[in-house]
Amino acid sequence: MATAYDIAMKQAETPQNGRASVVAVENLRKSFGSRKVLNGISLSVGSGETLAVLGRSGTGKSVLLRLIIGLETPDSGSVRIHGQNIVGLALDRLGEIRKKMGFLFQHAALYDSLTVAGNVAFPLAHHRKDLSNSERSDRVKQLLAEVGMEKDLDKMPSDISGGMQKRVGLARALALDPEILLLDEPTAGLDPISSGEIDDLILKLQRERQMASIVVTHDLHSARTIANRLALLDQGNVVIEGEYEDLKQSEIELVKEFLKQQ
Amino acid sequence: MGLVNGFFEWFGSLGVFFWRVLRAAVTPPYEWRELIRQLDEVGSKSFPLVALAGAAIGVVISLEARYSLSRFGAKSMFPATLVYSVIQVMGPIITGLIVSGRVGAGIGAELASMKVTEQIDAIEASAINPYRLLAATRILACILMLPLLTLAADACGLLTGWFAQSLVEPLSFHQFIQSGFHGATFNAFLPPTFKTAVYGLIIGLIACFQGMRTRGGAEGVGRAATNSVVLGSLFLILADVVLVKFILVVFH
């Protein structure tokens, strides 16, 4: 019987569901001191596809996203973006690849000295020098309108709620029209209504933009809503990967336990 | 053993950090807008404090010098004593320490706060080099502004020193300056003023380093701010020992 690793390796090498892999991590290992966080993970995501990475707190989900965008360096293994391994790339070279990626941090990580509009304009001001001030301003308004925040342009991040901060973070992540979207706990800490709104927003953006997305979450309901495939992590390993039905039919004790708890 | 390892680990990390900042600073794109903002932050906003400290030092030196020189019957040496004391010794070191306290703590706390709230990661994730945007601009601003702030402190010190003296014993400012700078060369005053650029490098580098390597929430932010000031001031004074000797050997 093929293990989750074998399946993922195969998926990483070949087009998936008819789509070529945009992000492929292979045999990724990461430790912090003596604590092993990721223990040889392999996953891949194709264009227009959303993979939800599930698991309990502390299973290395966020570390996986940080490795994919190069904020952490793995102990071994590779992270391929459109086939190019980004591990060990110089910061400026890595920057060119990061322009194709959008990242929503768990706590939004908005720049607290800038307004909502300033936060969204920040990547544009640095990477889209071809835009005039008015064009940039229009683009910011358009991005904020996409996430329903067009009325809060001049507010400071400290003056808006957690859910609104996530929306602004999402608009900032989309500013450079990324091909890859990485979302770290997009609904964590939000009430059910705000969570549902964020889920709907992610779904809408996915339909419109056809990005390759990886969503890290411990919220199964949210994962089912927004993802095509799900992967369950435990102790640095992929326990199971597939559609929700695959998880439901799994005989693995941990998977049953996880679904039951949710 | 752990302390020794920590000592070498700290210096090693500082060296790697400095190399990254240097490489980012000399390669485009240049962050002009942020540099100008930091020049204002370090320069204009430190000016009142530095000027006040310089003025106070001028009065203190004036009072002390008058008393000491009178005892040895060398009152005529007062202007030169004040000029040399302020410009060669007190002006640079006081400016350095004031800026280390104000700017070092500010940079350390700001970057540390950005680090623990993932704002620096967000900058990096947006394909922007944080060493270039955050560290290089702040360090360069410190290097460029320290000599200018020192000149301001020197000017205020000389002015208040002369004023304090003239309250006791009338002396025209023109006479004071002529007597104080009599026979002086540029070598006597320029190197002590421009050595403060090295102070700026130390203050900016240590504050950025401490801020950007912070871990551990609010406590980490506080620690970064404190370490930025303490280590910055300590290394500044240690560097002064080397710089004074260097200036004496090369320029005199």
Image (cartoon, rainbow, N blue to C red):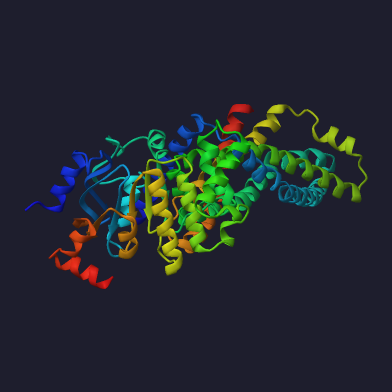
A169 vs B85: above or below? below
| Residue sitting at x 32%, y 65% | A221
Q: Which residue lies furthest to the left in this view?
A: A1
Decide if residue A234 is in sight here.
no
B36 vs B213: above or below? above
Q: In which quarter of the image is residue A178?
A: top left
B144 vs A171: above or below? above
A189 vs A120: above or below? below
User: Considering depth in this image, is A261 or B96 the residue closer to the camera?
Assistant: A261
Q: Position of residue B4 (x, y in %)?
A: 35, 52
Number of marks drawn: 0
User: Considering depth in this image, is B21 or B173 the residue closer to the camera?
Assistant: B21
Left or right placement of residue A17 versus residue B52 in this view? left
Q: Which residue lies furthest to the bottom in this view?
A: A261
Q: Position of residue A106 (x, y in %)?
A: 41, 58
Left or right placement of residue A163 versus residue B51 in this view? left
User: Considering depth in this image, is A109 or B60 the residue closer to the camera?
Assistant: A109
Q: Where is residue A193 in the image (x, y as percent from the top left)?
A: 45, 67
| Residue sitting at x 89%, y 35% | B174
Left or right placement of residue B170 versus residue A81 in this view? right
| Residue sitting at x 91%, y 50% | B167
| Quarter of the image where the C terminus of chain A is located | bottom left
Q: Where is residue A238 in the image (x, y as percent from the top left)?
A: 20, 56
Decide if residue A228 is in sight here.
yes
